[in-house]
Amino acid sequence: MKPRTARWARSRVVWMCFVFVIMEASAQPPLSPSSEAGEPIRFTQILQKLAQKTRLGLLAECYYAEELIPPTNAAMLGEDLRLETVAAVYRREVVRTRNVIILRPAADIAAVRRLEETQSSVRFPAVWWKGYDLLEMRSRKNADGGIQMSVKASGVPLSRFCEQFQKETGWRLQVEPELHTVRLFAEWGSASPGEVVEAISLLLRSGVEVNLSRTAEQKAAEQKAAEARRKTMEQWSVKQKYTDELLDGLLRELNADELSQFQQGAEVEIPLSRLSPELHTRAIRFISDSLEELISQLAPDAQMPLMRLREQLGECRPTIRLPTPMRKWLGVKLTDPNSGEHYVF
Amino acid sequence: MKAVTVLLMLIALTPFAAAQYRGYLPVQTGGCEQTTVNTQSGQWFTYMLVQRDMDTVVVGYPPQQMLVSDQTCNVECIEWNSGTYRIEITLSGVTQDNIYRWRAETRARYVAQRTTFYDRFVLYNARWSTDIYKDPDLFVAQAVVVDP
């Protein structure tokens, strides 16, 4: 072999070795950061990275076993975390509300995992979820009383989450005891308490019972306001007092058809001639007092027709108008015996 | 001891200091612009209510009387009989001499024969009942004649 040919062959071999090394290197699966550090990939850390990437909130149920054991196919996660990949690797289904992405385990997996978690928590209490106490909730009320809150939680039990939720919002979130130990990852920037509850219920596949209540102080204050308004109304019109006094008796005088009409909100009138003597006397007093009150509030030249009617009240076919949904008091209708015109007040 | 005496004197004088600002009541006036309003069954119609409240107050020392306009005038319908709907009340305007003009609007009830309905209103100052500038409420009634 000529020296030139030998040199060419040697350089060819070196070149091929170089290419082979490069190809071998590129054929290796990418090393995950955690495997470089010798640490398992923690699910909560992955969720945190995902949460940073999305503008929506993120909620998931976590298991300590998943925190410790690196997923067998961790390489699939890659550097550029994608929601679908994480869901596939950790066997979660993706559910969404308007503002929150929920990574939810399948129902049977959740049942098994929760049981394992309970057993392990008893066996390894010294290490169980140690160091996982991140729970930050901040809420602010707007002028109308609406609440917007931000949440950050990592591996905290649901019971603790609920306690903090109540402190921040005043909403008492009761969870059945079997679910108290469920560990949550939650992160979202702005949500209403209702959205938080909805997301948790979707995560747990749980029903929601809502119980709206007022405090004793609120009830007392409202009662006081209503009584004050009632007193004002009594000062504003004699009809308030008479309506309280007469209405039950008048309703007893109605026949079935009239009562049905009254209950449907229709105008119902009862002529005084139909009333029992005792009720008749009280009804006359009501009409007389209402008439006096009205006359005193009219301009002098508008008072005349009513003053004339007052003198001959018995001949005016007085009729009582029952309240309607729009008119809360009893009313009166008088008919002028001379002209036949009606007067309604 | 001196400080306590001074404090007690100040407390004793407080009612007299407050008495320098006092409204002379009642001076609220008002009523319906028209004695009687005429309309027909089912027609939309309006009428006006007027209200004026000037308070006389005594200010400073030596005391001087001052006339101030009360800008808390308000109106509420107590009973609406003429309309098929609740009567809508809107502020039509306030004149230079503090006359509030309120417009009441509704649709006349359907009648088979001429009927006079009476609507009642209260003109009041929107102030707490303990406010010395609160005048007594003023009640007015409007006669509305509705023809078939």
Image (spheres, rainbow, N blue to C red):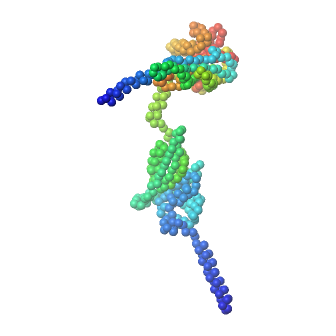
How many marks are shown on the rendered structure?
0
Q: Quadrant of residue A293?
A: top right
In the displayed structure, A42 sits above or below A14; it is above
Considering the image in quadrants, where does the C terminus of chain A appear?
top right
Kindly tell me whether residue A26 is visible in this rendering. Answer: yes
Residue at x 61%, y 75% (from the top left corner): A22
In the displayed structure, B87 sits above or below A280; it is below
Q: x%, y% of residue B74?
A: 56, 24
Kindly tell me whether residue A107 is visible in this rendering. Answer: no
Residues B96 and A332: in front is: B96
Residue at x 50%, y 46% (from the top left corner): A139
Considering the image in quadrants, where does the N terminus of chain A appear?
bottom right
Residues B8 and B107: in front is: B8
In the displayed structure, A34 sits above or below A118; it is below
Q: x%, y% of residue A190?
A: 54, 48
Q: x%, y% of residue A291?
A: 56, 13
Q: x%, y% of residue A283?
A: 53, 15
Q: Quadrant of residue A105?
A: bottom right
Residue at x 50%, y 58% (from the top left corner): A44
Q: Which residue lies most toward the left here?
A: B1
Q: Which residue lies most toward the bottom here?
A: A1
Residue at x 53%, y 20% (from the top left corner): B67
